[in-house]
Image: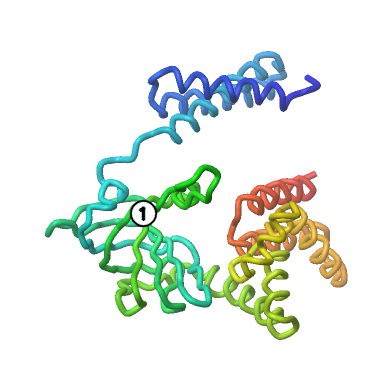
Amino acid sequence: MRTPALYALIFFVGGIVLATNTALPAMVYLGVAVLASALAIICFIMEKATTGRAAICFAVLSAGALLTELQSAEFPSNHVSRFASADQIMTVTGIVVSEPDIRPTKTYLTVQVDSLQYRDRVIAACGNVRLQIQTPTSAFGYHDRIKFTGYVNLPSSGRNPGAFDYRRYLQIRQISATVTLPGADRITRLQSGASEPFVRTIVTPVRDYISSVFKRSLPSEQAAVMKGFLIGDVRNISNEVYQRFKDTGTLHVLAASGANVAYVMTTLLLFIRLFRLPKQYRIYLLIAGVVIFSFLAYNQPSVVRAAVMAIVALIGMALY
């Protein structure tokens, strides 16, 4: 088979078409995908290549159908989007599921909702809310359980063709509603997220150190651009400079991706070689470095896929 990616694409698209034109539940596609994958492994172990390839085709077909079914599934009745824009004040309880986005004038928290107090009754709920605090604050951390009261609104959609669609922007990030509060004093922390020591003790201090080095060594605008180059953090880049990158078609350099992972691996490898460690120990340290960098870059999809490929390659080098 000289063009395996083409065949995979054909069967994947076939799965999308299948799910669009049938009403089978997602669990059926999941079961077929798992069984076909297991059969493919068994066939290749038994050296039955033709049957194994057919099983792989069924697995890819089912995977395409499964993902399509999951993407098109309706939200449950207790999803937070069902209560948005009800023009009533609600009390929301949930967990901060990403690191706080602290900017010069405001702070954003992504909160996974577990309950809503709505019309004098508490309802078990689900879905993510983007909480906007109108002041910069570091009072809340990753995985904190918090409680706040405010209006739950649907994000605004693009009003003009081709204009920025804020609702779609948040939907891609699996956020279905927004809440705006004037200050951190309107939020109660019910439980600390100290159970996530990796982010608190390693990722956040390293990221803060990188930011402090750039701030000490460079003017503010250049420091912001360097953070974009290194870890894909574009929050502090001015609109004018950001628009220049966009107009020149070079906006991609501000997104951490495979090149950044390659730079990190090369730098770590040169440093690790100074200690003359055995090959396997060097590979383990490289894997740890790639994982830490992925978290430093906020686990953006472009970084995650590059990190996964790098880790798979490193594991292959360690085993063979």
Q: Nearer the viewer, residue 108 or 194?
A: 108
Give the answer, above or below, for where 301 lies relative to 272: above
In the displayed orientation, state which residue is furthest to the top: 50
Which amino acid, mark 1?
Answer: Ala
Q: Which residue is drawn at 68% across and 62% down?
A: 288
- Residue that carries the numbered disc 1 in the rendered image: 177
In the displayed orientation, state which residue is furthest to the left: 120
Q: Which residue is drawn at 37% across and 62% down?
A: 95
Q: Where is residue 134 in the image (x, y as percent from the top left)?
A: 40, 74
Q: Position of residue 82 (x, y in %)?
A: 27, 46
In the displayed orientation, state which residue is furthest to the front: 160
In the displayed orientation, state which residue is furthest to the bottom: 216
Give the answer, above or below, for where 77 lies relative to 290: above
State the quadrant of the N terminus. top right
Is 117 on the left-hand or right-hand side of 18?
left
Is 123 on the left-hand or right-hand side of 54?
left
Is 66 on the left-hand or right-hand side of 5?
left
Q: What element carries label 1?
A: strand
State the quadrant of the C terminus. top right
Task: State the count of labels.
Answer: 1
Q: Nearer the viewer, residue 281 or 57?
A: 57
Is 4 on the left-hand or right-hand side of 169?
right
Q: Which residue is drawn at 48% across and 69% down?
A: 100
- Neighbourhood count class around disc 1 (C-alpha, 10 Å): few under 14, some 14–19, many 20 upward: many
Q: Which residue is drawn at 61% across and 50% down?
A: 301
